[in-house]
C-alpha cells in the first residue's frame, strides 16, 4: 500500500493565519516522521478550521 500525497490538492491558506500555519507545520512534522494518520488528522482539522473561519459570508460550509 502506498501513501498518497493529498497536500497538493489543498489550497494554501493566507500567511497571516497562525492557526493554519500551525496545522501545516504539524502536518509537515508528521509526514517527516512517516505518520500518515497524524498528517491526515492535521489536514482534516485545517480544512474544518478553514471552513469555519475563512469561508466568505453566504458560502456553504
Image (cartoon, grey):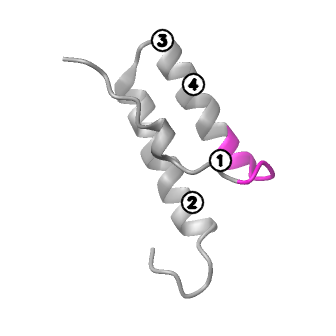
Judged from the image, the secondary structure of the residue bearing numbered disc 3 is: loop
Residue bearing mark 1: 20
Residue bearing mark 3: 33
Judged from the image, the secondary structure of the residue bearing numbered disc 2 is: helix
Q: Earlier in the sequence, mark 3 or mark 4?
A: 4
Residues in magenta, as a range: 14-21
**Residue 45 in the image, given as x and y percentages of width and height:** 48, 48
Residues at discs 3 and 2 in contact (Cβ within 8 Å)? no
Judged from the image, the secondary structure of the residue bearing numbered disc 4 is: helix
Residues at discs 4 and 2 in contact (Cβ within 8 Å)? no
CA separation in Å, label 2 and label 1: 8 Å
Q: Earlier in the sequence, mark 3 or mark 1?
A: 1
Which residue occupies 59% across, 72% down?
A: 55
Residue nearest the viewer, comparing 39 with 7: 7
Residue 41, quarter of picture: top left
Eyeballing the image, is 30 above or below 15? above
Which residue occupies 57% across, 25% down?
A: 28
Residues at discs 3 and 1 in contact (Cβ within 8 Å)? no
Q: Is residue 50 left or right of residue 13?
A: left
Q: Earlier in the sequence, mark 1 or mark 4?
A: 1
Q: Is residue 16 left or right of residue 5?
A: right
Eyeballing the image, is 1 above or below 48? above
Residue bearing mark 4: 28
**Residue 5 in the image, given as x and y percentages of width and height:** 40, 30
Eyeballing the image, is 52 above or below 23? below
**Residue 43 in the image, given as x and y percentages of width and height:** 47, 42
Amino acid at each position: 500500500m502506498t501513501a498518497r500525497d493529498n497536500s497538493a490538492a489543498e489550497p494554501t491558506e493566507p500567511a497571516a493565519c497562525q492557526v493554519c500555519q500551525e496545522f501545516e507545520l504539524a502536518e509537515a512534522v508528521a509526514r517527516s516522521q512517516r505518520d500518515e494518520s497524524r498528517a491526515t488528522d492535521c489536514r482534516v482539522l485545517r480544512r474544518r478550521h478553514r471552513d469555519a473561519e475563512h469561508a466568505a459570508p453566504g458560502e456553504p460550509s
